[in-house]
Amino acid sequence: MLAVFEQSIGKPPPELRQKKEAKTKEEIAESFKSWKPDLTFYQLSNGNFMAFSHGNETPSHPRSIVVMDDIFCIFSGGLDNTYDLRKHYGLSRQATEAMIMVEAYKVLRDRAPYPPDQVIKELEGKFAFILFDSKASTLFLARDRDGSVPLHWGTATDGSLVCSDDSEFLQASCGKLYTPFPPGCIFISDTGLISFDHPMHKVKAIAREDDDGNVNAVIFQVDLYTKLHSIPRRGSAANWAGATTVE
C-alpha cells in the first residue's frame, strides 16, 4: 500500500523532511506503478494519491481497501474482535476491517466526545491502516502496539508525506530518512502523532548521526517525562482532541 499527501494535508513531522535523496510525487507514483503492476490507483486532488496492491501479501497480513462516503481506507493485517466491533458500529457480518475503520472514524468525526486513542485501543489484533477523508482533508494513520504489521513513512522532495508498508520502496523513494511508523501510535493530520497507550505523553523524534554529525536516521518514541494536556475541540470535523505540551 502507498499514500502520498501534500504538506498542507499530510503535515509530516519536521524531522522527516529532507530533499537531497527523495523523489518527486510524480516519480514516486510512476515507480510504484512499475513496481506493482497489479495495483489499484486512486488519483486525488492536487496530485495526492493512494495505491493498493495484493502483491507480496501474506496470509497473516492481508490487505483490503474501501471507499465509502468520500473516505478512503487501506487496511493491512487483521482484527480478532471484528464480531464485537461490527455489532458496536451497527455493521453487517460482511463488513471488512477497512469498513469498520471508516465507520469508527465517522463516529469520531461527527459525534463522539472522546479522543481517538480510546477508539484505537478497542482494536484487538495486528494491523496498520491509512485513512483519508477527502471532504475534510483529514489523514488518519495507525499501527498496532507491537508493530506486527509494517508501516513506514518519509517525505518527497516537496515535503509531501509518503506512507507505505514496503520499506524497500520507501527507502528508494524517500532516501535514508524514511523510518518505521512508531508502534502503538496514531497520526492525525490536524493534531499530529499520539501514543494510544500513553496519550498524555509526547511522542518525540530522536535523530541518529554519523561520525561527521550528519543525520542518517530518525526514530520516534514515547517520552514518558513530557506530558500533554488534552484540550477538547468543538464541532464536527474539528471534534478531535488537541494537545499542548507540559514540560
Image: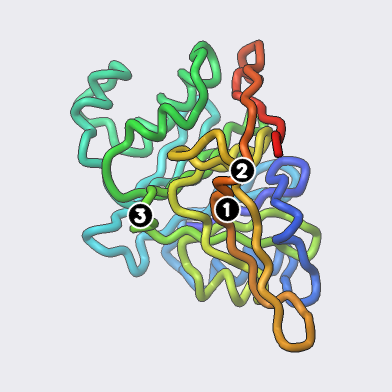
Q: Earlier in the sequence, mark 2 or mark 3?
A: 3
Residue that badge 1 annotates: 3
Mark 1 is surrounded, within 10 Å at the Cα level, by few (under 14), some (14 to 19) or many (20 or more) other residues, namely many
Find the residue positioned furthest to the bottom. 211
Q: Are marks 3 and 1 in contact (CB under 8 Å)?
A: no
Percent across and percent down for residue 114 are 49, 18
In the image, what residue occupies the spot 63% across and 17% down? Answer: 232
Query: Which numbered mark, 2 or 1, is in the foreground of this view?
Result: 2
The residues tagged by marks 2 and 3 sit, at their Cα atoms, a distance apart of: 19 Å
Residue 190 against residue 225 in the figure, above or below = above
Q: Residues within 10 Å of mark 3 (few under 14, many from 20)?
A: few
Looking at the picture, tell me which residue is in the foreground, 3 or 12: 12
Q: Which dot, 2 or 3, sits closer to the camera?
A: 2
Q: Secondary structure at mark 1?
A: strand
Instruction: Work out whether mark 3 precedes mark 1 in sequence or the reverse, and give the earlier one.
Output: 1
Mark 2 — residue? 202
Measure the C-alpha gap from mark 2 to mark 1.
25 Å
Looking at the rendered structure, the secondary structure element under dot 2 is strand
Query: Pointers 2 and 3 in contact (CB under 8 A)?
Result: no
Q: CA distance from mark 3 to mark 1?
A: 22 Å
Mark toward the viewer: 3 or 1: 3
**How crowded is the residue under tag 2: few (<14 C-alpha within 10 Å), some, or many (20+)?**
many
Q: Residue at x 62, y 67 (%)?
A: 178
**Three-letter code, disc 3:** Asp
Q: Which residue is mark 3?
A: 146
Q: Residue 143, how many percent across, how many down?
A: 43, 49
> Is 147 placed above or below 44 here?
below
Q: Nearer the viewer, residue 42 or 214?
A: 214
Give residue 217's position: percent from left, percent from top. Answer: 64, 73
The three-letter amino acid code for the residue at tag 2 is Lys
